[in-house]
Structure formats: C-alpha cells, structure tokens
Image (cartoon, rainbow, N blue to C red):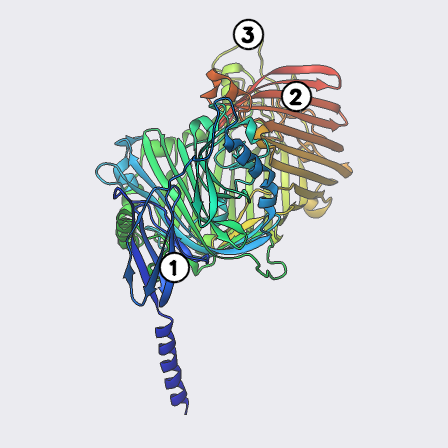
Amino acid sequence: MKRIHLTFLLIFGSISTLFAQEFKLKGSIKDTEGQAVPFVSVYIKNTTRGTSANVDGIYTLALDKGTFTIVYKAIGYKAIEKELSIAENTEENVILAAESYTLSGVTIDGNAEDPAYEIVRQAIKKRKQHLTEVKSYTANVYIKGVQKLVGAPKKFFGRDVQKTLDLDTNRKGILYLSESTSIFSFQRPGKIHEEMISSKISGRNNAFSFNKASDLVVNFYDNILLENSMSARGFVSPISDNAFLYYRYKLLGFSNENGETINKIQVIPKREHDPVFRGIIYIKEDSWHLVNANVYLTQNSGINLIDTLKISQQFLKVEDTYMPSNMNFQFNGNVFGFKFEGYYAGVYSNYNLHPNFPRNYFNGEILKITKAVNKKDSLFWLNNRPIPLTPEESRDYVRKDSIAALKTSKPYLDSLERANNKFGIVKILLTSYTINNRYERKRLRFDPILPALFYNTVEGFGARYGLTYTKDLEYGAFYSIRPEVRYGLSNKLLTGSLSGNYYYDPVKRASISASIGSGIYDLNNHGSMSLLANSFNSLFFETNFSKFYKKEFANIGTSRELTNGLQATISAEFTRNTNLINTTTYKIKDLKGETFKSNNPFSPEVEKPLFPTYEAFILNAALTYTIGQSYITRPDRKIYQESKYPTIRLSYKKGIKGVLSSDVDYDLISAEIYQNRISSGLWGYSSFVVGAGKFLNNAQVYYPEFKHFRGNNSLFGLPELRKFLFLDFYLYSTDREYFEAHFEHNFSGLLTNKVPLLRKLKLEELAGVSYLSQPLKRNYTEFYFGLQRLIFRAAYGFAYDGNKRVNHGFRLSYGF
C-alpha cells in the first residue's frame, strides 16, 4: 500500500511539474537604426512581474504556458505591446522607435516663462504627498554590479598591473562581477528589511555579495539625495522644495502614453558648480508623478572619486502610484592612470503594496545573509537571472570560476606562498614581512624594523618589536597571539609581553583577550604622540613631550553584544607600576634656549618621582548603546551601519585595595554621549561628543589611574574629535570630577566651492569648539576653524582659560 501511495505521489508530482513548467521568452531589442537599446523594461502588462534587458539589449523572461501581453519600455522610446502565446521557449526580437515629443499647441514667447516651470511647480506641490503615499511594500530585487578597467599603467609601485589584477594584454578586464537576488521590505517612516536569497561573485565561490537594494534607492521626492555617499553634502533634487534656486527648466515636448500625457523636461543647473543634476525628467500631467528620470552628475557637481555618474530610473504603474521597475547607475573615472567604468543595475518586480508584516519584523536588521545564499548552482542562476549576461560577463564567470577551485587547492596556494613569502629588505624594513599559509588559513607577521626604532630621554635609542600569529577559523572567527619586546640602550631596561585574542563569534562581536608581561607606557593612557613624532621632536628640537612609566601586568577581558546595539565589556587587571626618570640628554641639534624637561610633567626642571612604586588591582566594566542601531547580518560578521541617533557609553572603574596586595582604592563612574556625521543637508554635517565623570571614592589614586584627556602640545597630530588642540598632555588630568564637550561642523565645500581658485582642490571648511571643566580648569574653551582634504587638515585655533586667551596658532593633522 505504501508503494502504491509513493508511486501515485511521484506521478502526480511529475504531472504538476509539467503543468507548472516555465518557458523562456528571449530576444534582442534594438532601435530603428539597428543599435542595441540597453536596460529596457520588459514586463507583463497590468502586473509588476518583469525583467530588464542587459547593456547589449538582450533580454530573457521566464513565463508559464499561456497568452500574455508583453510591454517593452525604455526612456526616450515609444513603448510597444505584443501579445504572445507561450507554449515553448520563444524568441521575440523587438525594434523600438524613438518617442516623438511634440510642442504643438504650446506657444513659448521669448520673454515668457517656459511651460516647464509650471509643470515642475505642480510636481513640487505634490512632492510630499508622493513621497508618503506608499506606506509599505515588498518587492523582489535583482542586482548586478560590474566594475572593469578599460586602461591602466604597465606598472604601479613596481608591480606588474596586468598580472596583479588578472587583466588581458591590453590591461583591460572585469575587476568585479556580482549578482544577487533578495526580498526587499519597506515601511514608513524609513524602516527597511532585506533578505538575500542568492549571491554570486565571479571567481569567489564562497564569498557573499555586498549588493544592497537600499543602496539603489534614489528617491527624487526627497529634497537632498546621495548624502554621505558620492558627496558629504548630497545633491539637490530637481523637484525639491527649493529647486528653483538651483535649476532652470525647459519643456522639450509631451507625448501620449496609454491616454496619459507625459511631459519631457530638461533640467539645467543655474550655476556650473552647484550640487545638482543634469539631464531629463518625465512628469505625468494631472497627477504630477515623476514617471522616468535620466540624469547625471559630474565632477563639477561635487562627486568624489569618479568623473561621471549616470542615474536612470524607469517607473511602473502599481495601483494608483508609480514604483521603480529598473534602476541603473553607470559610472566612469580615472585615478592615477587607472581608467575604470561600470554599472549597477537593479530590477524590482512582484510589488505588494499591502503587506502584512509580523510583529517586530523591522528590528534594525536591514539586510540578512545566511550561509545558504552563495550555495546556488549554475542551473539556479540560469533560471532566475532577470538580466542576461553579456558575452564578456559570461567569459569572466567561466574563466574565473574554473580556476576558483584551483586557487583553493594546496598545490596552487603553496606555489603562491613560495612567491609571496619571499624575504625582502623593503618588507622587513618598511612595511612588514608576512609568512602566509592560505591553505591552512594562518599567517605570521613580523613588524617592520624601521618604524620599531625610537628615541626618548627615558630610554635613549631603543626598539619595540613584535610579531603576530593569526589563525582564521570559520565565518570570520579567528585567534591571534602576539609576543613583543622593548629595549632602551640608555636605561638598559628590557620589557616584554605576550597577548592573545580569540574572536569567537563575529555576529555577536564576541571576544576574549588576555595578556601578561611588562612594558613602557605613556603616563596619559590616551597617548600623547607617536614614538616617531616624539623621537623627531627630541632629537631635532630638544623637546621631549612624551612622559613614560613602567608597567608590569596581567589582565583578562571579554566583550560581547547583549542585544542589538548594546555592547558589554568587562576586564580585570593587576599591575605593578614604577616611576621612570630621564637617563640621557642626547640630541642631534642643540637649539639655543631649549633644554630637555624632566620625565615628571609637574616638575620640569628637577627629576622628582611622580608616584611611588605601587600595585593595583582594577576592574573595568562598560556598556555602550547606540540608539536605533541598524546592521547587516552576514555569516562571517555583523556590520553596524551609521545610526541617525547618538551612542551612549556608561563605564565604571574600580581600584580594589588589598586584593593581591593592591594599594589603590577608588571608584570612577563616567558617561559619554556622541554622534558622528549629523546631516545638515547642503550645509554639511556635524559631530559631537559630551562626557562627564566623577571619582565617587578617591581614597588612594596614583597619577597613572587619573582621568586623562586627549591633549596636544605639538604642531602635528592625529585628527580626533575628542582631542584638544592646545591642552597640555598631562597637567590637567584629575582624580575628582570633570566635564568635557566637543563639537565640530564640516561645511563640505559650501564656501570654497564658490571660489574658482579653490574649487578644484575640493577643500572642506570646518569649525569647532572644545570645552573642559575640572577642578584645575573650571572654564577652558577652544575655538578653531580650518580646511580639510581627504586625510589632511589644517586649522587655526584659540584657547581661553575663562575670559583670558592663553594660546593660539596653527595645528596640522593627517590620518583618519
């Protein structure tokens, strides 16, 4: 009986499969002159099920058996409909004629306002309504990204570009080819959730695509677009509330599409270097919906890193509104002789404007990628790829995927390591020398020698050298072990330590770390300046800014995310701390009027011990919570996205007397709230941090345990929002209470963009203020302004102690 049932089920399943069989409708789409029309929307009439042609005008659409009306639609072309009966794989080639936009019946007087202005005016009136008319929706999204080099130098930093980037003999080729499919969900105001279904990257069989549907969302009903992506300031929409301040408009004509009048309008910048688009928008009469857009940005608009970005949007009518069906971003640029171009294409289909989301569906996770996502085979992609591959893309997949397995084999990796692991003088002296074993996923990295060398007045000439062993585990987990030694020729003091870190759960950002040994440390636990900078100042300017002490220690700590956005850290440490003094006054150049100061910042002329040798047993605990934290979940990591809301950090530090002969006895509680890159639209962005703390108990606190601040005594430094420009590194640390605040605004070229000589430099103006109050500095304030470009910054500031100006001058910084 069971066999009869099984046979019946197999027969029934086979019949069901036969009836449900899908066929392929495919073909080419060209214009009347025989040229391919790229990225044409191809969909079933009165549905949101469809696809897009590729860059060569080739399309494919999976259909069940039956009769369908297929719509072929592209910006600038007259849409056509074809009724097709599908009973087998079918080829249907299509020729699209250019849409004729007429101005018949429209009189434009030379002194009169162009009719386009009234059309745009009506669209602006409807902007907010159209922005919010869709409360929620779900859609299937397919994304393909292609980046390729079309020209490159023969060598770059001595390396053969063709071999390094796997290019053809003309140094051309695809650098990155990726596809993904996902289900995208949206709910106002601004809630999104995406679940990736499949992912494929050419030549990387086990990788997960970084495609994200929300990155393709460019909604022209928003006033400002593409903030903090192509530009910090963003770009003004052609139908924004203040669009008439930035754009001129010209009506190119109108056409009739299924009984609806579509206006074709050219958008023209009023000023060459404003952050605006150029191109064509299409607005439907009466409802004033934007139904298509074909615009672009240039370097004059303020885009970064690329020369031109073209954005093409095609919309599909869904119920009483219009939703994107095809999104296409095409770009090109030239950096250091590397000429590149590419595109990202997105196809949205199967819209549902009335989804019923379960409770807590939108929980901060904006994209979920599971382990099964990259396991889909070639048959799956053959049946589920909406945009056909071009011949070049097909060859790239075949070639790179065929050698992907080879590249993970032990013989290949061994041969690769024999070449890459060769010892080199430059590696060991300047960069680093690494011995890799990719097959076993482990590596040993030796620190470069020259950056390890230093000079200071406490140790004299010396070296701090270490090596790091790392073993990669599954899905982003790893552990590392690092031994390090330090020796000073003048004080003849050898210290060394051994530390380890086990990052065991990347999704929960969970780790355990421990270390033991001894070392020479800065008296300010935030650091004062780098060893190189301090060495330079000491040897050439007879100025020893950094002050040091010896610490022998053993510690253990752990960190883990407790819930979304809430990270907990706890550690325990035992230390033995010893005061150090200067042991040398050597300098390369003896400057008149300059002498080295003692290692005690409070007694610069005489070497007096700042603190006695003491033991300390210290517990640290901290909670960090980011309000409204959004994130991407991948099998190998959890990626936090920049939040629209602040982060709050609470910490508690306790020195416990008597445990392991500990001499300290104190309790420090502190809180901090901060946020970076708060958008101000075209005015740039702001960042701030506010912190306060108090020693609830300071019965026994030695100087290294004080609350220290990020000061600065030198012309050069690293950029850091919490860093003061003129505050002494050491003198105003406290064992009582404190309050500090920092605010900075970056105008992102708002002013310099209007100065012709400065415009091409793409400088960003900035201004800021820092404030500190503690028992010795009740009302310390700094004001500064400056310019920034990439990692370099120059600022001029003023420091006030109460109402008295105590310092001013330039400060230069570099780095991230």
Q: Residue at x 35, y 34 (%)?
A: 427
Name the quarter where the N terminus is drawn.
bottom left
Question: Label 1: how many residues lie within 10 Å, few (<14), some (14-19) or many (20+)?
Answer: some
- Foreground mark, 2 or 1, reads 1
Cα–Cα span, label 3 and label 2: 32 Å
Q: Secondary structure at mark 3?
A: loop
Residue 241 place in picture, x, y as percent: 59, 34
- Residue at which label 2 appears: 783
3 or 2: tag closer to the N-terminus: 3
Q: Secondary structure at mark 2?
A: strand
Give the numbered dot on residue 69.
1
Outermost residue toward the front in this view: 105
Question: Label 2: how many residues lie within 10 Å, few (<14), some (14-19) or many (20+)?
Answer: some
Q: Give the residue type at disc 2.
A: Phe
- Residue at which label 3 appears: 592
Residue 728 place in picture, x, y as percent: 65, 22
2 or 1: tag closer to the N-terminus: 1
Answer whether labels 3 and 1 touch (C-beta < 8 Å). Answer: no
Q: Give the residue type at disc 1.
A: Thr
Q: Is residue 358 above or below residue 105?
A: below
- Foreground mark, 3 or 2, reads 2
Q: Is residue 482 visible?
A: no
- Left or right of 385: which side holds 634? right
